[in-house]
Amino acid sequence: MTPTTAPRRLPHPAPDQIRLEGVLHALSDPARVRIVCALAAAESGLTCSAVEVPVSKSTLTHHYRVLREAGVVAQVYRGTSKVNSLRRDELEELFPGLLEALLTAADRQDRRS
Amino acid sequence: MTPTTAPRRLPHPAPDQIRLEGVLHALSDPARVRIVCALAAAESGLTCSAVEVPVSKSTLTHHYRVLREAGVVAQVYRGTSKVNSLRRDELEELFPGLLEALLTAADRQDRRS
DNA sequence: CCGTTAGTACGTGAGGTGTCAAACTACGGA
DNA sequence: TCCGTAGTTTGACACCTCACGTACTAACGG
């Protein structure tokens, strides 16, 4: 019954620990903006490798970690993979309208180029 | 007639050179968020030293430069000082609603702490 | 011309960031 | 039990960032 290994968990910041500067910093990298846009477009969560970003596996891990530690995404293990989702509601509560504005801004910029 | 020295000018990015990532990076520092909020609250432009930020003069120059190069603020010389203003309209055109959302987000966070 | 005020340039140092490859762990299935 | 897949960890590297002090320039007021 007692598991030999602890269930794999990942530390997430509580809503009141999420800092605006941190969120903005997390989104100041094109790779991470890409990830966030993909998550926003998806109905449910996505695994790490589901989003196409032209970097190595370890770099990808790094980017997801930055997003999680900033409070932008939530990550849970599911079998051998990890499922990522946007912390939409919490961010909306903290910074109303911000995420939407960011997503449309990113979308616009994509279209322009 | 021909001036011995060129009139002091500062390079600003054109609207189509302003990148979302750059703007977000510029705003991922508390000191710069502070500056931007002050500029937003002011009716007209502010000199560099008009915004109270607890850093040295040279560091302050650095922060204003980052903001200008990201396309967030415009700077013009006026006598011995430099006047800073938000590039509101241009940012609004590029990323509608973003600046407003950022400002209210910063304001909210301020209030919380 | 001199002094004051406002900001700049430069060099430096501590610390962070993005990137990778290589070796590793965890899970699920044959 | 062994294999493959998914992600992690570590260490290395080049580069960037923020901070500072010091020395500088530009403009204004006598």
Image (spheres, coloured by chain):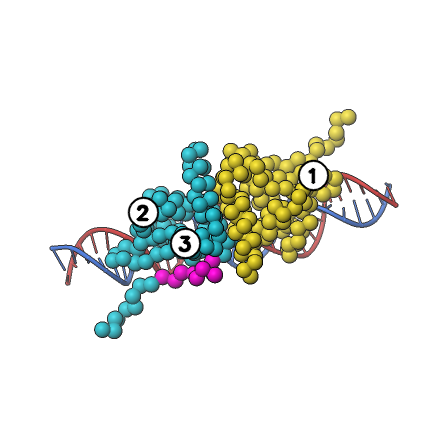
Chain colours: A yellow, B cyan, C red, D blue
Q: Do the residues labelled 1 and 3 touch (CB within 8 Å)?
A: no
Residue A5 in magenta stretch: no
- What is the quadrant of the C terminus of chain B in the image? top left
Question: Same chain for marks 1 and 3?
Answer: no
Type of amino acid at the residue the image marks with label 2 = Glu
**x and y, in percent, of residue B82 in the image:** 30, 55
Segment colored magenta: B10-18
Q: Can residue A29 be seen in this view?
A: no
Query: Which residue is labeled 1 in the image?
Result: A77
Query: Which residue is labeled 2 in the image?
Result: B43
Q: Residue at x 55, y 41 (%)?
A: A70
Chain under numbered label 2: B
Type of amino acid at the residue the image marks with label 3 = Asp
Label 1, residues with CA under 10 Å away: few <14, some 14-19, many ≥20: some
Mark drawn on residue B112: none
Query: Which residue is labeled 3 in the image?
Result: B89
